[in-house]
Amino acid sequence: MKVLVFQHISCEHPGIFRQFFSEAGIDWQAVELDAGELIPDLQPFDALWVMGGPMDVWDVETCPWLVAEKEAIRRWVRDLQKPYLGLCLGHQLLADALDGECTVQKRPEIGILNVNLTDQARDDPLFRGIDPTIKCLQWHSVAVTHPPRDAVLLASSPDCEWQAMRVGPNAWGIQFHVELQDSTITDWAKVPEYAAALDKAKGAGSLQKMQVEAKSHMPQFKSNARQLFDNFCRVAN
């Protein structure tokens, strides 16, 4: 399997999934869109993963490459109909590219929080084997508010209804972060936009508390990541 990865900031890479890619012998190529790298020919790739970033889906003036990225996502999902996985911004871009809508939330979700899977998730190919309620890292202030017309709701939280969705038979978007590794929170806290959002939502000095809490849940984070990865590989193959 050959995986194309769209990245929007260097620290938001596939995280622990890089280890899983290596172990499975999966060939993957990252495109640093924010650094000016161009989207390659999509045809040779078997799956597309789109990661998170500090920009928003509507920031086309400051991030003009978002236009081409949305076009590529639309072609990938609707025309090529190959497996897609979007995380955080990648989840929002999936909605936006397919005529959905994202808006600023009344209350940002930042921290280690609960997400509840829906009944539809129990038989979903990507979420099969995941517990009905899981702890996960949230770090966003924008949410999908109007999904694409054929979206199926797979997970929700009190402040964000569309935490996860499947669009058609081949595309998934996940608002929460499943790619965590031990260094993730420390690395992301170095991004000014993320640090400011964390302090505003949780108060100054909250980083250390979140690091401690994340460490206690890291075995579950990694177990869920492994399950999702294995499920995705079955879908893609």
Image: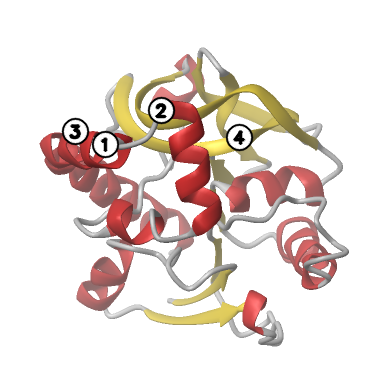
Badge 2: residue crowd in 10 Å (few <14, some 14–19, many ≥20): some
Q: Please count the marks in the image.
A: 4
Looking at the rendered image, the quarter that the N terminus falls into is: bottom left
Q: Secondary structure at mark 1?
A: helix
Residue 191 location, x and y as percent? 47, 60
Give the vertical position of 192 relative to 177 (above or below): below
CB atoms at circles 1 and 3 under 8 Å apart?
A: yes
CB atoms at circles 2 and 4 under 8 Å apart?
A: no
Name the residue rendered at 83%, 70% in the picture.
Answer: 64
Q: Earlier in the sequence, mark 2 or mark 4?
A: 4
CB atoms at circles 1 and 2 under 8 Å apart?
A: yes
Amino acid type, label 2: Lys
Real-space Cα distance between discs 3 and 2?
A: 14 Å
Real-space Cα distance between discs 4 and 1?
A: 17 Å
Q: Is residue 171 visible?
A: no
The residue that disc 1 covers is 210
Compared across the picture, whether 219 is left or right of 156 comes to left
Amino acid type, label 4: Ser
Looking at the rendered image, the quarter that the C terminus falls into is: bottom left
The residue that disc 4 covers is 141
The residue that disc 3 covers is 213
Amino acid type, label 1: Met
Compared across the picture, whether 27 is left or right of 58 comes to left
Give the vertical position of 40 relative to 151 (above or below): below
Q: Nearer the viewer, residue 146 or 74?
A: 146
CB atoms at circles 4 and 3 under 8 Å apart?
A: no
> Which numbered tag is attached to residue 202?
2
CB atoms at circles 3 and 2 under 8 Å apart?
A: no
Q: Earlier in the sequence, mark 3 or mark 2?
A: 2
